[in-house]
Image (tube, rainbow, N blue to C red):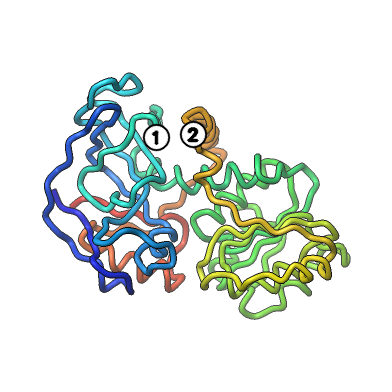
Amino acid sequence: MRAIRFEQTGGPEVLRLEDVPTPAPAAGEILIRHEAIGVNFIDTYHRSGLYPVTLPSGLGQEGAGVVTALGSDVTRFKVGDRAAYAMGTPSSYADYKVVSAERAVQVPAGVDSRTAAAVLLKGMTAEYLLRRLYPLQAGQTVLIHAAAGGVGQLLVQWAKVIGAEIIATVGSLAKAERAHALGADHVILYRDHDVAAEVRRITGGVGVPVAYDSVGKDTFAGTLGSLARRGLFVSFGNASGPPPPIDGQQLTRAGSVFFTRPTLADYIATTEELDASAAAVFDMVGSDTLKIEIGQTFPLSQAAEAHRALEGRHTIGATLLTPE
């Protein structure tokens, strides 16, 4: 089979398409023939070395397709089922992938593989951020950065269903239009405006009880300055680079605020948590409550171009790789 591999960390140019043996599932595992592969910012962190992996390495943590082989002791799937997964050993950028049956989920009828690969990781991220890390309530005001991105679009739509007032930030006028269309009540161009000042203006000086920041370095100060007293700063991405180290006194001066740096893996740590989170996402997709925008699709051989687009912030919605 074909797979994207890299032997050293660096820019997109380190990615290589190679011919490698097709893996065979061991006990408790399934082999999935990919129909679509999700591209996520965490993939760029693995490639760059920000999140270290053992080299040489594959890349990618999300995909969907058809189960073509079973290891022994598998009861959750049969050959021919459609399955999707998120997280795990980076090796999704390939024609096939072996996955633990306990870490994959059934793709329900009515959800195609492209949609499943586009939504599962991002959707489960939105689910735990809005429903479990901080149970957002109707009537609350929330700040969502990168609102036109893959996770951001889902956060905006899901927060709107909850009944929150949404302040969104984006990097361009085109993305601002998209955020408004998804349900954002207020949109700030974060490169052109003082985010904290705008949030204070919108909220009558109070600030927001929770802010979701996937951008990192460039938005850190604005996010911290946007929080209400005892507000929660949820930092879950590094699109512009890692956020700076925090001095505890910063949190005190900002109003006894809280800072957390969560990861999806800790919110789908058990099979039961995984199934519940995925079911919530697929229910929202199946009911057309979450509209999934696949903004760009690249063939597997052009994984490097997909990374350049993602890191250059030239993407809208989800990005996919597809086997040629």
Residue 251 sits in quarter? bottom right
Residue at x 59%, y 52% (from the top left corner): 262
Mark 1 or 2, nearer chain start: 1
Q: Which residue is mark 1?
A: 103
Evaluate whether residue 128 shows in this view: yes
Q: Amino acid at mark 1?
A: Arg
- Apparent side of residue 110 relative to residue 277 in the rendered image (left or right): left
Q: Which mark is residue 67?
A: none
Q: Amino acid at mark 2?
A: Leu
Evaluate whether residue 286 shows in this view: no
Q: Which residue is mark 2?
A: 274
Rendered view: 120 above or below 239 = above
How crowded is the residue under tag 1: few (<14 C-alpha within 10 Å), some, or many (20+)? some
Residue at x 79%, y 49% (from the top left corner): 140
Judging depth in this view, the residue of 277 and 323 nearest the camera is 277
Dot 1 and dot 2 residues touching (CB under 8 Å):
yes
Question: Residue 316: x percent and y percent?
Answer: 46, 62
Judging depth in this view, the residue of 232 and 138 nearest the camera is 232
Question: Residue 204: x percent and y percent?
Answer: 88, 65
Question: Residue 59: x percent and y percent?
Answer: 30, 56
Question: Residue 89: x percent and y percent?
Answer: 34, 48
- Apparent side of residue 125 relative to residue 39 in the rendered image (left or right): right
